[in-house]
């Protein structure tokens, strides 16, 4: 059985990085983690854009319409006035998936008390899953992978463990993960034979 190719949209939202004031680290961090975590052949569509709600919403719609079954954003999720990524994401949503934001904040709280200021959301638009991640590369990996005990066992599941099954349920491709990075959870009835 062949492995499905997956088209993934990655969006870094930053006024300063999008104008060249400093180097964007969000897009490389997303690309690196997803390349390590997924066994599928991947096609990335990248966007580096400013903190403008209409621009963010337009980019998300464009990526979904281009066939990205998964769209991840990084940046613009705090309480600052220019942080509008959650509003832009909710504006294009068919459905909200509150568990994504809840779990991201839970993971981040293990590191910083200011995690309660984060407003990340997860949504479905058509056959695509869209969710917001933190802006720092280390926090992106922690959020996606979760927290591990010193012996390597999972202490707090990362959000990506639920992503492949969610994409199954909304009619997207079958995502296969590298269990050394992130073990996907699916009920037995949803598993494909290797």
Image (cartoon, helix red, strand yellow):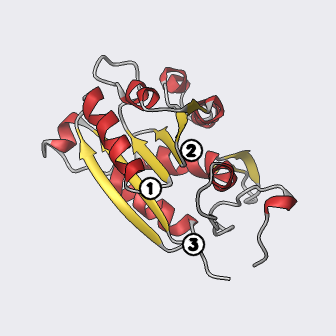
Q: Residue at x 40, y 53 (%)?
A: 9
Which part of the image, by quadrant, shows the N terminus? bottom right
The local crowd at label 1, few if under 14, some if 14 to 19, many if 20 or more residues have their Cα within 10 Å, is many
Q: Earlier in the sequence, mark 2 or mark 3?
A: 3
Q: Residue at x 52, y 51 (%)?
A: 141
Query: Does any portion of residue 111 appear in the rendered image?
Result: yes
The mark lying in front, picked from 2 and 3, is: 3
Name the side, left or right, on which 144 lies relative to 162: left
Residue that carries the numbered disc 2 in the rendered image? 143
The mark lying in front, picked from 1 and 2, is: 1
Q: Residue at x 37, y 55 (%)?
A: 66
Viewer-side residue, 31 vs 115: 31
Q: Position of residue 177 (x, y in %)?
A: 64, 66
The local crowd at label 3, few if under 14, some if 14 to 19, many if 20 or more residues have their Cα within 10 Å, is some
Q: Give the image quarter of residue 179.
A: bottom right
Q: Position of residue 142 (x, y in %)?
A: 56, 47
Residue that carries the numbered disc 3 in the rendered image? 4
SS of the residue under disc 1: loop
Q: Position of residue 40 (x, y in %)?
A: 55, 72
Q: Position of residue 192 (x, y in %)?
A: 76, 70
Q: Earlier in the sequence, mark 1 or mark 2?
A: 1
Residue that carries the numbered disc 1 in the rendered image? 68
Which part of the image, by quadrant, shows the C terminus? bottom right
Q: Earlier in the sequence, mark 1 or mark 3?
A: 3
Name the side, left or right, on which 183 lies relative to 107: right
Q: Give the image quarter of residue 164.
A: bottom right
Query: Does any portion of residue 51 appear in the rendered image?
Result: no
SS of the residue under disc 3: loop
Indicate whether 6 appears above or below 50.
below
């Amino acid at each position: 059985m062949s492995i499905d190719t997956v088209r993934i949209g990655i969006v870094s939202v930053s006024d300063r990085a999008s104008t060249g004031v400093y180097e964007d680290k969000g897009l490389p961090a997303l690309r690196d983690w997803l390349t390590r975590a997924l066994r599928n052949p991947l096609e990335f569509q990248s966007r580096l854009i400013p903190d403008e709600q209409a621009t963010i919403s337009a980019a998300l719609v464009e990526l979904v319409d281009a066939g990205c079954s998964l769209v991840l954003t990084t940046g613009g999720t705090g309480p600052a006035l220019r942080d509008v990524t959650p509003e832009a994401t909710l504006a294009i949503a068919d459905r909200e998936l509150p568990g994504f934001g809840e779990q991201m904040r839970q993971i981040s709280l293990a590191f910083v008390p200011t995690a309660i200021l984060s407003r990340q959301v997860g949504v479905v638009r058509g056959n695509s899953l869209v969710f917001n991640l933190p802006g720092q590369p280390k926090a992106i990996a922690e959020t996606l992978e979760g927290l591990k005990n010193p012996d390597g066992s999972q202490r707090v599941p990362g959000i990506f463990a639920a992503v492949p099954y969610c994409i199954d349920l909304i009619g997207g491709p079958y995502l296969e993960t590298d269990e050394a990075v992130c073990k996907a959870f699916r009920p037995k009835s949803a598993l494909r034979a290797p």
